[in-house]
Amino acid sequence: MDDTTEDRVLDGRVRLRQPVRGYRAGLDAALLAAACDAQPGQRVIEAGCGTGGALLAAAARRTGAKFVGVERDPSALVLARENIAANKMEDRVQVVAGDVGLRFAGLGLPVFDGALANPPFFDDPTALRGPAAERRGAWMADDGLEAWIGFLSKAVREGGTITLIHRADRLADILALLAPKTGSAQVRPILPFIDQPAKRVLVRAIKTGKAPLKLLPPLILHDREGGKHTAEAEAILRGEAALEWC
């Protein structure tokens, strides 16, 4: 496809073809992959995997685990399959056509040990200036955040983990939607600079978990000394460190 670029992530360990104009995996996908703590032998599903940015980075980090991505956009699905092959991960990573707005049971897959997602950031069309048509599916959750968290909750076994990245101002909604089925939630704020409020949060919860909520130390992305990223953020983006959970 001439309207794609080939990018390198995880310090060049992962090749990723993605559209020039459509949704492109970026920092949020990289942080979601770094937050995946799948153990050897475990199975992980990503809802809305796009062209495989987070999926392949998580697989590169967690070489003993197996991954399945679910994507409804046919063109993104084609690129995701090509990216899996280009990175020689066919034995551990696959993608399937599916819609988060539909039931997980309709995929015909057994439940997973873990689930990942970077849900669309908006679910109210009146609260967002209309995105370009090629980006709407990635930016607008047609069935709402509730459908995404419902899908993730059904996709994992009891004791399985749900990990997602989203807007910080939706944290209360995320925790409320997770509460009926999960517990042991942990929240890691993502701050642009040390003196600015969080714009993103990473949230991890355990299905049927009982431990109280934990608010973890934040990840600071940038410093004001001229470097693009803080040393911690740079190590995470290069794949030299992971985002740890308690």
Image (tube, grey):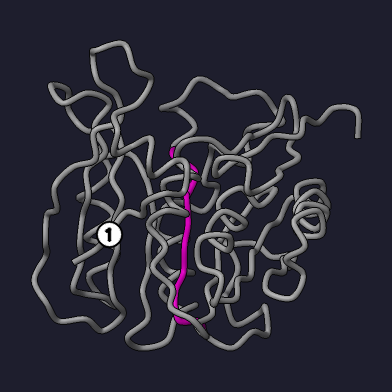
Tell me where residue 30 appears, x and y as whole percent: 48, 44
Check the picture and name the quadrant holding the C terminus: bottom left
Whether residue 37 appears in magenta in the rendering, the answer is no
Left/right placement of residue 211 relative to residue 67 reads left
Q: Residues within 10 Å of mark 1 (few under 14, many from 20)?
A: few
Q: Quadrant of residue 161?
A: bottom left
Tell me: residue 84, above or below residue 107.
above
Left/right placement of residue 19 relative to residue 14 reads right
Left/right placement of residue 215 relative to residue 36 reads left
Read off the residue under disc 1. Answer: 244
Q: Quadrant of residue 131?
A: top right
Rendered residue at 74%/76% (across/down): 91
Left/right placement of residue 9 relative to residue 224 reads right
Tell me: residue 145, above or below residue 47.
above
* Residue type marked 1: Glu
- In this view, the residue in front, 173 or 119, is 119
Tell me where residue 147 appears, x and y as whole percent: 46, 61
- In this view, the residue in front, 132 or 112, is 112
- In this view, the residue in front, 50 or 191, is 191
Tell me where residue 103 appears, x and y as whole percent: 57, 74
Q: What's drawn in magenta, residue-wise?
A: 112-122
Q: Quadrant of residue 10?
A: top right
The furthest residue to the left: 212
Rendered residue at 47%/49% (across/down): 119
Whether residue 113 appears in magenta in the rendering, the answer is yes
